[in-house]
Image (cartoon, rainbow, N blue to C red):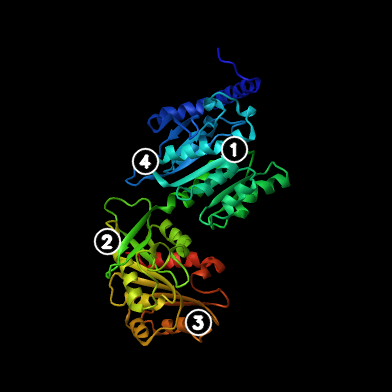
Amino acid sequence: MKRYPVMQLIQYGTILFLALLVTPAFAQSQQTTTSMIRDVSFETEDGWTIHGTYYLPEGASQDPAPGLVVLAEPDWNPRYLSGNISRGVAREGIAALAIDMRGTNASFGSKDFQMFTQEERDAMQLDIRAAIKFLSSQKEVDSKRIAIFAANITADHAAREAAHNLTQVKALVLSTGRLTEEGRAGIKYRKDLPVLAIASDDDPRETQELSSEPFFLSHDRGSRLMFVADRGASIFNRPGQPVERVAEWLRSNLVALGTQTEVSFKTEDGATLHGTLYKPDGVGQNDKVAGVVFIHGANHDATTWYHLAREVTKTGLAALIFDQRGYMKSVADARSASDDHDTMQKDIRAGADYLASQSWVDPNRLAYITATSRAAPTVLAAHGDPRIKTLVGLSFYGGTAETNKAVSEMEIPMLMIASINDANADGGSLEEGTREAYRLSNNKESELLMYDDAGRGSSMLKTRPELTGMIVRWLNEKLAR
């Protein structure tokens, strides 16, 4: 007969009592969606067997769905009490995997969590890592769009795993947790990681501040702070629609991100360029969506457009960000960066050609977004290309006679944005270059937006956050059928 520590027996008794309270609702869910829910198990790197419940996303889609790992609280809630949030996100098209952490409930193993040393508690991060591996291996799941829900003690482990797994973990939901320095660093230095920090209305102010910390550490514009009743995973059994609010946030910051694929393509002169292709969710087999090609400035790379590309994709447009030759991932195969307009045009046209070649992209509804010294070659690349329906330029660097002639001959609407008194040390004025492009534009719908002091090029998206929404609306309007 197996012996259990007293604490484990007490824990089991509490779990049984709670399970009796939630059994009717859970049983009803099992009856209505039996084929969508199944119990699973898998092993961690150090050989611990973890048990969980896998919730398949509802509805069929030709594209893989994002996934959510739901961590049960090892010192309180079993995974079955996380059923509300798991089923809630499954309704939004997210696959969910709720697990019992090592030393608890079905994943009890050989030692009670309450008896763990600190080193053994730290090893819980391996449970999360194994859960991500299992979830991402499912054919229905997009392995590069995984989020983690963690509460209380597991919040710090989730933040650490996000720092460890840059390619798969794309969002965190942390409920009333406290972070160590390592956990704080995991959030602070990942500028592409949106965090939903959940604090309890029932807690004293000092505790609320600790629970809110992940939000204030995050640099991602999708991060939010939410106050709820109760704490940890128990919030999902309380009023205030916490399931719906969390699911809505995940829909915006995980589902709507679309499928991201690392790609490479050739220019006409044989250079290999590397980038990321964003395919919006919900694209049917016979659908064709408009697309946007992002052209980074001379002192930047593809990542400068990360946030804007993501917001564009959320609205149903395709997006392509890429490193021009000589930059970041495109350095090795493309020799060195070049300020030659002809060379830059080849890179820009190659981006448009690649995006237009996708079977789900409408090749006749494309746009360019460009900045600073790349504005002139982007205009030249767009000139005479009937696929390009609009161009957004941030801080036009003074155009040549050839560029000015191209602007005056193009009939597409252009959105031009710059800062007043933006000038280079060599005397070139980006303010005047932007004004001149607007003056020469041959389309009455073209618009000019001048700020007193918003910085230059893509950096304006940080100093003036409202620009993101304005640009996204412009693109959707001009690329509409």
Residue 87 seen anywhere in this rendered image of the structure: no
Give percent across and percent down for residue 60: 34, 42
Name which residue type carries label 4: Glu
In this rendering, the answer to whether 405 lies above or below 363 is below
> CB under 8 Å between callouts 3 and 2?
no
First in residue order: circle 3 vs circle 1 = 1
Q: Which quadrant of the figure contains the N terminus?
A: top right
Helix, strand or loop for disc 3: helix
Residue type indicated by callout 2? Ser
The residue identified by callout 3 is: 431
Q: Quadrant of residue 288?
A: bottom left
Q: Position of residue 297 (x, y in %)?
A: 45, 72
Distance from the alpha carbon under mark 3 to that under mark 1: 54 Å
Q: Residues within 10 Å of mark 4 (few under 14, many from 20)?
A: many
Q: What SS does tag 1 mark?
A: helix
Q: What is the crowding at mark 2: few (fewer than 14 residues within 10 Å), some, or many (at least 20)? A: few
Using the numbered discs, state the Cα–Cα distance from disc 3 to disc 2 in whole angstroms: 36 Å
Q: Residue at x 59, y 22 (%)?
A: 12
Residue for badge 1: 122
Q: Amino acid at mark 3?
A: Glu
Give the number of the mark in front: 3 or 1.
1
In percent of the image, x 38 and y 81: which residue is there?
441
Q: Position of residue 3 (x, y in %)?
A: 59, 16
> Any mark on residue 357, and which?
2
Along the polypeptide, which appears first: circle 2 or circle 1?
1
Query: How far across and how far down the image is residue 321, in percent?
Result: 40, 63
Assign the C terminus to one quadrant of the image.
bottom left
Three-letter code, disc 1: Asp
Residue 140 — which label? 4
